[in-house]
Image (cartoon, rainbow, N blue to C red):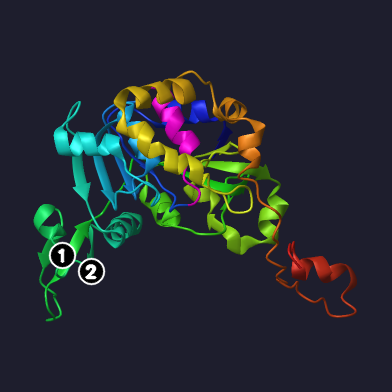
Amino acid sequence: MTLTDLASAVREHVEDGMTVALEGFGHLIPYAAGHEIIRQRRRDLTLCRMTPDLLYDQMIAAGCARRLVASFFASGSAGGLHEIRRRVEHHDPEPLEVEEYSHYGMVCRYTAGASGLPFMPLRSYAGSDLPRLNPRIRRVADPYGGPDVHVVPALRPDVAFLHAQRADADGNVQMWGILGAQQEVAYASRRVVVTVEEVVPSEVVRADPNRTVIPAHAVDAVVECPGGAYPSYAQGHYDRDNLFYRDWTAISRDPARLAAWLTEWVHDLPDRAAYLERLGAERWASVGVDPRPSGEVDYGARRVPAGLGDRAGDLTGEVVGG
């Protein structure tokens, strides 16, 4: 695992033509990572995501994508994704291949990939038109004699980019709040890069181990990137910028305005810190949050029987969180 900067992580782990997943379900969307991929002008990518939203509208407009594998096309319930619509409905300026699933279908694809399975069965396509529109959704006989079931193929991205509240320098990644399929994506992907609001001492992670959604052995690189999920939100750090989500419809509806936005907010900026500086203190303060601790959990530490003296360490070892 490498503790690095975002530009280096993208240069090392993303190549043209790769299958790339940028996941985060409404919350902890890795915008900074997506912008760095745009900035480095990666091309012909297959982009995978549950709910392709503003980020994928931006990446597709920037020319990064050849193909989109996704579920539920929406702009955070705040408007339209007009770049995606232009590509799909009018092939303007060029067509975009789309492979569509339900949310659960995407989760099952990631789960199959994470489990080393060729496919995953599910029942939720009964009565749906998706199997007719997507030939990769198939029906198979139940080997135990029940009715046929639909199956979806495993999804194994070449690299996944995720965002989280914190990680330690070893790569143990902790999240809280709304979670999507980040853990399944991490285990399904060949490489995993995680941007975090802060890198913390290992003692902080060990003191609250149940928040470690993605352990170090599944992570290739960690990048400290405050504000890396904006304009989505990072629970406990900042709220979603709903004004930006509402404004995006008008921006994406006009190709010239969208191109100008990409120039001003991505190509002309070196990194996320510069993005936040251009955003301005007042706008950043508008998404600020007040502290709301969730309380404490007592993990307990092994009690040392009286009289053991110096042998106590032999019995207890190192226990953090007691």
Vertical placement of residue 51 versus 264, above or below: below
Left or right: 1 in relation to 156: right
Name the residue at 42% across, 50% down.
186
Q: Decide which of 245, 34 is in the foreground and name it.
A: 245
**Figure quadrant of residue 311:** bottom right
Q: Nearer the viewer, mark 1 or mark 2?
A: 1
Disc 2 residue type (three-letter):
Ser
Q: Position of residue 290 (x, y in %)?
A: 70, 53
Left or right: 263 in relation to 71: right
Tag 1 and tag 2, C-beta contact below 8 Å = yes
Q: Is residue 89 magenta?
A: no
Residue 169 in view (yes/no): no
- The quarter of the picture where the C terminus appears is bottom right
- The quarter of the picture where the N terminus appears is top right
Residue 212 in view (yes/no): yes
Which secondary structure is most common in the magenta stretch? helix
Q: Is residue 40 magenta?
A: yes
Name the residue at 43% across, 57% down.
180
Near mark 1 (Cα within 10 A), the count class, few <14, some 14-19 or many ≥20, is few
Residue under pointer 1: 128
Vertical placement of residue 91 versus 74, above or below: above
Q: Secondary structure at mark 1?
A: loop
- Alpha-carbon distance for marks 1 and 2? 8 Å
Q: Secondary structure at mark 2?
A: loop
Q: How many marks?
A: 2
**Figure quadrant of residue 46:** top left
Name the residue at 29% across, 61% down.
108
Left or right: 175 in relation to 90: right
Residue under pointer 2: 124
Q: Which residues are magenta?
A: 27-41
**Figure quadrant of residue 132:** bottom left
Q: Position of residue 274 (x, y in %)?
A: 58, 25
